[in-house]
Amino acid sequence: MTTERTYAMKFIYAIVRKPGEDFARGITTSDLGSPDYKLMLKQHRDYVNTLKSLDITIIPLNPLRNYPDAYFLEDTAVNTQDGIVLTNPGADSRRGEIVDIEPVLAGFDRVLRINAPGTLDGGDVLSTGSHFFIGISRRTNRAGAEQLGRILEDQGNTWTPVPVERCLHLKSSVNYIGNNTLIITREFADRHEFKGYDKIILETAESYAANTLLVNDSLIMPTGFPRTREMLEKTGLDIIELDVSEARKMDGGLTCMSIRL
Ligand code: CIR
């Protein structure tokens, strides 16, 4: 591990929410079968314990009644490092999650917000430091992306919109793993927006592994993607594999289940 590694951000806290018993009523397009609550809770505990083991202080929240997707906290807020931006989630069934998370975030930093008609999910926002990519997706519209873009520019950052067509969120397919390097699916690898970055390009069968989470010096990746693991090992980062099979059945994964601050 080199000491001069460049992070997108160094994290101290993670806000996490225990999945509720109704989590299987969340939105999903996957055909991976019905998720199991007990297993979901175990996998969520493992996720939280892994973050703790990386010296991250956990802010735990309880399940949110009537919001089965609310444990995918990432979609509700964007940490720009100069403040926190409360989103306006693109799915109607998730919009009310904002009311609950706002006071929690207000304890950390200045909170700005995305307003209707703009919609934006945090899963569409990828930071590589002072540059941000914002996915224009089924959840994030151009108005939402432009609102966030203006906030980022005011803070001295830059941003690029990226069309997202075949997956839920931008970060379902692309994540930043430090040192100017992206982990990226084949679908996005040749896009002009990502020119200038080094890339770990995933085999199509391992595309889900794009949702890998960099926490300081460690990469948390989903289990079951051996070719991706081999490529990631060459980065010299510590690699931790976590089974997130139940979140995957609900179209989520590692980045989605926390807000890192
Ligand atoms: C949804 O469709 O909104 C949830 N079932 C999954 C959200 C996953 N979030 C993320 O990728 N950031």
Image (cartoon, helix red, strand yellow):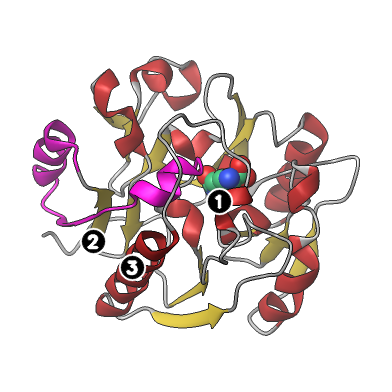
Q: Is residue 253 visible?
A: no
Query: How many numbered discs sit on the rendered protein?
Result: 3
Q: Residue 77, located in which quarter of the rendered image?
A: bottom right
Q: CA distance from mark 1 to mark 2?
A: 30 Å
Residue type for callout 2: Ser
* Residue under numbered circle 3: 42
Decide if residue 64 is on the left or right side of residue 131.
right
184 to the left or right of 150: left
* Label annotation for residue 187: none
Identify residue for label 2: 218
What percent of the width, then of the height, locates residue 144?
78, 40
Residue 92 lies, with reference to residue 52, above or below; the image says: above
Residue 103 position in % (x across, y down):
75, 80
Q: Amino acid at mark 3?
A: Lys
User: Which residue is at 55% across, 31% downward?
Assistant: 29
Q: Earlier in the sequence, mark 3 or mark 2?
A: 3
Q: Secondary structure at mark 2?
A: strand
In the displayed structure, would residue 171 be above or below residue 71? above
Quadrant assignment for ligand 1: top right
Question: In this orientation, which residue lies closer to the viewer: 132 or 45?
Answer: 45
Dot 1, crowdedness within 10 Å: few (<14), some or many (≥20)? Answer: many
Residue extent of the magenta highlight: 224-251
Q: Position of residue 61 (x, y in %)?
A: 58, 78
Q: Residue furthest right?
A: 117
Give the residue type at disc 1: Ala
- Marks 1/2 in contact by CB < 8 Å: the verdict is no
- Relative to 130, is 26 on the left or the right? right
Above or below, comparing residue 110 to residue 170 in the picture:
below
Label 2 CA crowd tier, 10 Å (few <14, some 14–19, many 20+) = some
What number is the disc on residue 24?
1
